[in-house]
Amino acid sequence: MPIGVVGNLGKPLTEGVTRLIVAECKDVGKEIMLPHSLALHIGLPDMGFSDQEIASSCSAVMVLGGDGTLLSVARTWPFWGMPLLGVNLGNLGFLTEVEEVDVLAALAVLRRGEYVLQERMMLRVLVNRDGRQVYESVVLNDCVVTKGAFARMIRLEVHIGNNFFKTFPADGVIISTPTGSTAYSLSAGGPIVDPTMRLMLLTPICPHMLQARPLVVSPQDRIAVKVHSIHEDVVLTLDGQEGVRVYPKDEVVVECSDIVTRLVKIVPRSFYDVLRYKL
């Protein structure tokens, strides 16, 4: 089966690495499929396909960029559940599997199918307004309800399952997956969690209350956050990449999704090796 290559055109190395992969695949007679935008960018429009065509035809997808690129591809509908191999062309590269210098070796492993898949849970995020659903999405890292840049703190009413948990004033709240535990949640004082686990983390952002602490929530429960504020400068962000305006009395509902992200693992290292090296 062909191999897909998706790249972040904002990264200077993307064009060169893509050309390297294309040349290698031609040498070994392996078919490769690129998104239209990337194919046009490197001057090979005949190699361009839609996301749906790539996802339905390829055995795996190489994602060139960084953690942000991998998060974006994981949220994109046609690639849900596809084996994704992250190639780091950025800085931290916590989620990506290999560095740019190892791309050809990683490509050979993909061709031979000599890799394992690690499933990462995702979150389903809903926004309810006046008794009706107005938004739905999935995230791999986290969703964040937060005040705007110049707004006062907001009051957040949190329900877990059928139980009222707490109302507290804060700059916002982070609801993350175990994969997202090393992202924004970590910076806000949340715990680090093995990313293969299934659970949710609820981490308040600068709460004005001593008892508002990070909380681990069962994957069988759902978290509902109602926004109480006197202003309308409140935003729901998804993996730090998409933003949705949230209005007073809106309810943000978060639960474990049936959709999973499947990451290709070819390097024999544990999460704790990565944690020690990257952080």
Image (cartoon, grey):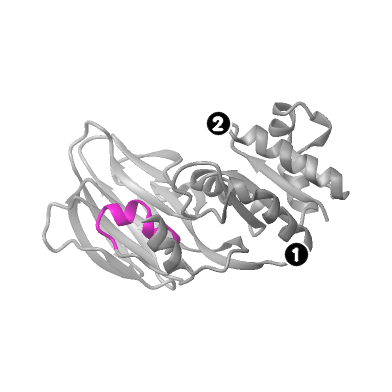
The C terminus is located in which quarter? bottom left
Taking the image as shown, residue 276 lies to the left or right of residue 41, namely left
Residue that sits furthest to the front in the current view: 101
Mark 2 neighbour class, 10 Å CA radius: few under 14, some 14 to 19, many 20 or more: few
Mark 1 neighbour class, 10 Å CA radius: few under 14, some 14 to 19, many 20 or more: few
Q: Residue at x 62, y 36 (%)?
A: 14
Span of residues in magenta: 179-190
Quarter of the image for residue 47 reads top right
Marks 2 and 1 sit apart, C-alpha to C-alpha, by: 30 Å
Magenta stretch mostly in which secondary structure? helix
Taking the image as shown, residue 118 lies to the left or right of residue 18, namely left
Residue 162 visible in the current orientation: no
Q: Is residue 6 magenta?
A: no
* Element type at mark 1: loop
Please state which amino acid type lies under the numbered disc 1: Gly
Q: Which mark is residue 10?
A: 2
Whichever of labels 2 and 1 marks the residue nearer the N terminus, that label is 2
The N terminus is located in which quarter? bottom right
The residue at which mark 1 appears reads as 113
* Residue 6 point in image, percent of width and height: 66, 42
* Residue 30 point in image, percent of width and height: 85, 50
Q: Residue at x 36, y 62 (%)?
A: 223
Q: Residue at x 77, y 53 (%)?
A: 58
Relative to 207, residue 160 above or below? below
Taking the image as shown, residue 218 lies to the left or right of residue 155, namely right
Tally of marks? 2
Relative to 250, residue 256 above or below? below
Q: Residue at x 67, y 57 (%)?
A: 82
Please state which amino acid type lies under the numbered disc 2: Gly
Residue 268 visible in the current orientation: yes
Taking the image as shown, residue 89 lies to the left or right of residue 183, namely right
